[in-house]
Amino acid sequence: MQTSRIALIILSIIAISCQSEKKQKETIKIGNQQKEISAFDTGKKIFKGKGKCYTCHKIDKNSIGPSIHKIVEIYKEQDADLIAFLKQQAEPIVDPETYAVMKTNFAIIKTFSEEELKALEVYMTEVQK
Ligand code: HEC
């Protein structure tokens, strides 16, 4: 039983350290109001709103496109640059065979600012469920 106890302790440590990952804050100017909202929230809003990403990317299951978790896992493994992909400066590495489907969304992605792309990356990397 000793080993399962050790495994439990290790799992707890991992869970705690994941939770304490700090969320990046950004100051966003809306009209003439300065408002502090996190990059995570901005990314979430774009992902589910004007970016239309959520139509094809669910969080942890594959649908029309691969799940966010799958994408992020592969990007971490290969130390790849998600923003470069969104800027069409890097080749697809997750599922090149269906890249044509993803490509239809670049017309929207092209209109995003550097901050918005960064926010999308933060959201995709940090989202849990
Ligand atoms: C019409 C469906 C569709 C929409 C909308 C869409 N995607 Fe995708 N996406 C896909 C498909 C299919 C793939 C798998 C092909 C590929 O790997 O490029 C993909 C792959 C990706 C990848 C992995 C690229 C790689 O290296 O292979 C990223 C990152 C991504 N999408 C981000 C986004 C973001 C961010 C948005 C919203 C701004 C978005 N997608 C909107 C269908 C879509």
Image (cartoon, rainbow, N blue to C red):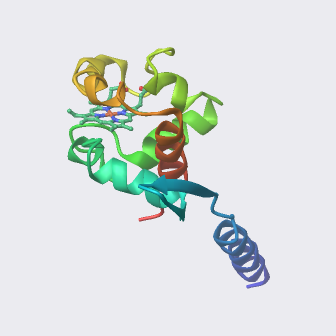
Q: Is residue 6 left or right of 44 when viewed as pictured? A: right
Percent coordinates x, y for residue 66 in the rendering: 33, 39
Count of labels in the image = 0
Percent coordinates x, y for residue 108 in the rendering: 28, 30
Quadrant of the drawing holding the C terminus: bottom left
Q: Is residue 114 above or below residue 53?
A: above
Q: Give the camera-side residue of 59 and 28.
A: 28
Do we see residue 70 in this rendering? Answer: yes
Q: Is residue 122 above or below residue 100?
A: below
Percent coordinates x, y for residue 20 in the rendering: 70, 71
Q: Give the camera-side residue of 114 and 59.
A: 114
Residue at far front of view = 32
Quadrant of the drawing holding the N terminus: bottom right
Q: Is residue 5 left or right of 112 when viewed as pictured? A: right
Q: Which residue is found at the position 47% from the left and 15% from the top? A: 91
Q: Which residue is found at the position 30% from the left and 24% from the top? A: 106
Q: Is residue 111 left or right of 5 when viewed as pictured? A: left
Q: Quadrant of ligand 1?
A: top left
Q: Is residue 54 left or right of 79 when viewed as pictured? A: left
Do we see residue 127 in this rendering? Answer: no
Percent coordinates x, y for residue 70 in the rendering: 44, 43
Q: Which residue is found at the position 70% from the left and 75% from the top? A: 16
Q: Is residue 63 above or below residue 18?
A: above
Q: Which residue is found at the position 59% from the left and 56% from the top? A: 27
